[in-house]
Image (tube, rainbow, N blue to C red):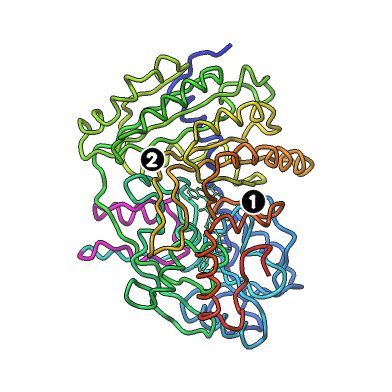
C-alpha cells in the first residue's frame, strides 16, 4: 500500500498542501502598479484606479492573493506610497461619504479588503522595516511580508513569530491574531507581541496606540482583525533572540493509526516545554496519485519543532516524541533535522503553488480537544473532493483571555479545515465539503480565530471570534474612533 517515503517526499508533501504562497507576490498590486498614471481622486503619490477604468479589473483581482476573487467591487482602489497618502485617501473617503477598507498582503481567505463601494486603500508598498536593537523592536510597515521581517530581524540576531507562509502580509496577520513560527513560546498569537501601533483614524489623523497612549485602541489593534476601524501604518513589534539549535521531527502515519497518534500527542502535550511546537494535519500523501482511493492516500502528518538554544538542548526537547509510539507507527519519518529560522520556510514554501494558483477557503476553531476533532473529522476527510484540502492543527497555543487584547478565548489549540482547488466548477463541491467538516470541528469548539473564519456561507461565525463583552467593547471603541462609520465593519456585518 504505502512505500517508505524519503525525506524529500516529506518536505514536498508539506509544500504541496499546507502552505501556498510564494507566487502570491506575482499578483501583488505593487508589481501591477509600475508606470501607472495618477488619476482624479485623492491626491496621492501612488495610483488611483476607479471602477470603469480599463485596468480596474486587473487591479481589483490583484488585491486578493488566491483565485477565489470575490464579486465585490469598490468604487476606487488607492495605492498608498506614504503615510500621507493613507491620510489623504481616508480624508477623501470621509469627505465623499465613501467607506474604507485596507489591503496589506492580500492573503485573507475571504478577500475582505474588497467590498462593494468605497475606497480600498492598498498599503502593500509601505514595507519598510527598521530594527531598534536597544528596544528589541521591529518598526514594521504593514505591507511587509513575513519573509522580509525574518531576514531583517535575523540579520541582527532576532526573530518574530512570522506567518508560516513567507508571503503573508504582516498587516493583516498580526491585526487578526497570527499563529506564527515559534508561536508556543510567543504567547500563542503574534498580536500579543505588538508593543505599539501607528494608526490613521477616520478623521485622517495619526495616533499612536500603546499600553499608555490610547489603551482602548491598543487593546483593539491586538486582535481586532479584518473589520478594524483605522489604517495601521506601522507596528512596533517585539523581537526575540533567535533560537540557534532548531531541530524538527516529522512523522507520517496511516489513518488507521490516527486514534493512537492523537492520544500520544495529547500525552506529549501534558507538561511539554513551550519551546516545542507541534503541528499536525490530515492530508493527501504526496507520493500517491491525486485520484488514489482514500485508503491508499490519506495520511496524518506530525511535525514537532524544538527551538532550543543549542542542538543538544533541542535533541533533549524532542526526545519524548522519539520515544513515543509515533516513530513506531510511522510509514515515513525524519528525526532531529537541523534547521535555522529562515530554513523553517522550507516546510512551507511551495514547489506546487496550490493556494497561489488555486481557489481557497478555510474555517477553524480554537479548541481544547484537537485529537478528538481529528478522529471525528477523519471519515469526512476521506471524501474530500480536492487532494490539496487538509485539516491542520496548531497544538499548544495556550491562549488566555487578557485585559490588553481583544483576543477573547481560553483555548490551548487551533484546528482549521482548508479547501484549495483549481477548477471553478468544483466550487460548490469544495464549499459543501467544508460545510460538512465544520460540525466536526464545532463539536469541540472553545472559540474561533478571526483570521481563518468562513463568513461567505457562515456570516454568523464572526460573532464567535469574540466574547459578548469584547464584542461590545469593540463596538464602543469603533464609535469613539470612527463615529461616522468611515471604515467598513466585518464582512457581512452592517
Ligand atoms: C497561504 C496562506 C498562509 C497563511 N498562513 C498563516 C499562518 O501561518 N498563520 C496565521 O495565523 N494565518 C495565516 N494565514 C492567514 C492570514 O493571517 C490572514 O489571511 C491575514 O488576514 C492575511 O493578512 P494580509 O495582510 O496578507 O491580508 P489582507 O487581505 O491584505 O488583509 C486582511 C484584512 O486585514 C485588514 N488589514 C490589513 N492590513 C491592514 C492595515 N494596515 N490596517 C488596518 N487593517 C488592515 C483588512 O480588513 C483586510 O481586509 C495564511 C493565509 C494564507 C492565504
Which residue corresponds to mark 1?
Answer: 454
Query: Which residue reaches farthest front?
Result: 469
Residue at image coords 67%, 40%: 434
Residue name at image x 45 percent, y 18 percent: 332
Between 200 and 433, the one nearer to me in the picture: 433
Q: Identify whether 486 is placed above or below 196.
A: below
Question: Residue 6's image quarter?
Answer: top left
Q: Position of residue 147 (x, y in %)?
A: 41, 51
Residue identifier under label 2: 344
**Tag 2: Cα neighbours inside 10 Å, few (<14), some, or many (≥20)?**
many
The x and y percentages for residue 261 are: 46, 23
Is 154 colored magenta in this rendering?
A: yes
Residue that protrudes farthest toward the top in the picture: 1
Q: In x, y percent, where is residue 127? A: 44, 65
Helix, strand or loop at mark 1: loop
2 or 1: tag closer to the N-terminus: 2
141 left or right, relative to 226? left
Whether 265 is drawn above or below 452: the answer is: above
Q: Tell me where the magenta segment starts and ends, as one range.
A: 134-163
The quarter of the picture where the C terminus appears is bottom right
Mark 2 falls on what kind of element? Answer: helix
Numbered disc in front, either 2 or 1: 1
Amino acid at each position: 500500500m504505502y512505500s517508505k517515503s524519503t525525506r524529500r517526499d516529506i518536505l514536498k508533501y508539506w509544500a504541496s498542501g499546507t502552505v501556498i504562497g510564494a507566487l502570491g507576490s506575482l499578483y501583488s498590486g505593487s508589481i501591477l502598479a509600475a508606470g501607472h498614471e495618477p488619476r482624479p481622486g485623492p491626491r496621492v503619490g501612488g495610483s488611483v484606479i476607479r471602477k470603469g477604468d480599463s485596468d480596474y479589473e486587473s487591479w481589483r483581482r490583484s488585491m486578493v492573493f488566491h483565485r477565489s476573487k470575490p464579486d465585490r467591487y469598490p468604487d476606487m482602489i488607492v495605492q498608498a506610497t506614504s503615510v500621507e497618502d493613507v491620510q489623504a485617501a481616508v480624508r477623501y473617503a470621509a469627505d465623499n461619504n465613501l467607506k474604507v477598507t485596507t489591503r496589506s498582503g492580500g492573503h485573507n481567505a475571504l478577500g475582505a479588503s474588497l467590498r462593494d463601494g468605497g475606497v480600498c486603500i492598498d498599503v502593500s508598498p509601505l514595507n519598510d522595516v527598521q530594527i531598534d536593537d536597544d528596544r528589541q523592536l521591529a518598526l514594521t510597515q504593514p505591507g511587509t511580508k513575513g519573509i522580509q521581517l525574518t531576514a531583517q530581524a535575523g540579520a541582527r540576531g532576532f526573530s518574530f513569530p512570522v506567518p508560516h507562509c513567507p508571503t503573508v502580509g504582516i498587516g493583516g496577520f498580526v491585526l487578526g491574531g497570527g499563529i506564527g513560527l515559534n508561536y508556543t513560546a510567543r504567547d500563542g498569537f503574534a498580536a500579543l507581541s505588538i508593543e505599539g501601533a501607528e494608526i490613521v483614524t477616520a478623521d485622517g489623523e495619526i495616533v499612536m496606540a500603546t499600553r499608555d497612549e490610547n489603551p482602548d485602541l491598543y487593546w483593539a489593534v491586538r486582535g481586532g482583525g479584518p473589520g478594524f476601524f483605522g489604517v495601521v501604518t506601522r507596528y512596533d513589534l517585539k523581537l526575540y533572540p533567535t533560537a540557534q539549535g532548531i531541530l524538527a521531527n516529522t512523522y507520517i502515519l496511516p489513518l488507521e493509526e490516527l486514534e493512537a497518534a492523537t492520544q500520544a500527542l495529547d500525552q506529549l502535550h501534558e507538561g511539554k516545554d513551550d519551546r516545542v511546537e507541534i503541528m499536525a494535519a490530515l492530508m493527501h500523501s504526496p507520493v500517491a496519485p491525486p485520484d488514489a482511493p482514500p485508503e491508499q492516500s490519506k495520511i496524518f502528518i506530525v511535525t514537532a519543532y524544538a527551538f532550543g538554544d543549542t542542538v543538544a538542548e533541542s535533541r533533549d526537547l524532542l526526545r519524548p516524541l522519539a520515544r513515543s509510539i509515533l516513530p513506531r507507527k510511522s510509514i515515513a519519518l525524519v528525526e532531529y533535522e537541523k534547521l535555522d529560522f529562515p530554513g523553517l520556510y522550507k516546510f512551507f514554501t511551495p514547489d506546487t503553488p496550490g493556494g497561489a494558483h488555486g481557489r481557497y477557503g478555510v474555517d477553524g476553531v480554537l479548541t481544547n480537544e484537537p485529537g478528538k476533532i481529528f478522529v471525528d473529522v477523519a471519515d469526512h476527510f476521506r471524501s474530500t473532493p480536492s487532494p490539496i484540502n487538509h485539516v491542520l492543527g496548531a497544538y499548544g497555543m495556550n491562549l488566555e483571555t487578557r485585559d490588553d487584547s481583544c483576543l477573547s478565548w481560553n483555548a490551548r489549540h487551533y484546528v482549521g479545515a482548508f479547501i484549495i482547488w483549481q477548477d471553478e466548477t468544483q466550487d460548490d463541491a469544495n464549499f459543501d465539503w467544508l460545510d460538512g467538516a465544520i460540525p466536526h470541528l464545532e463539536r469541540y469548539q472553545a472559540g474561533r480565530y478571526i483570521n481563518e473564519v468562513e463568513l461567505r456561507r457562515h456570516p454568523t461565525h464572526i460573532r464567535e471570534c469574540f466574547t459578548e463583552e469584547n464584542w461590545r467593547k469593540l463596538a464602543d471603541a469603533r464609535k469613539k474612533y470612527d463615529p461616522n462609520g468611515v471604515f467598513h465593519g466585518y464582512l457581512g456585518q452592517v
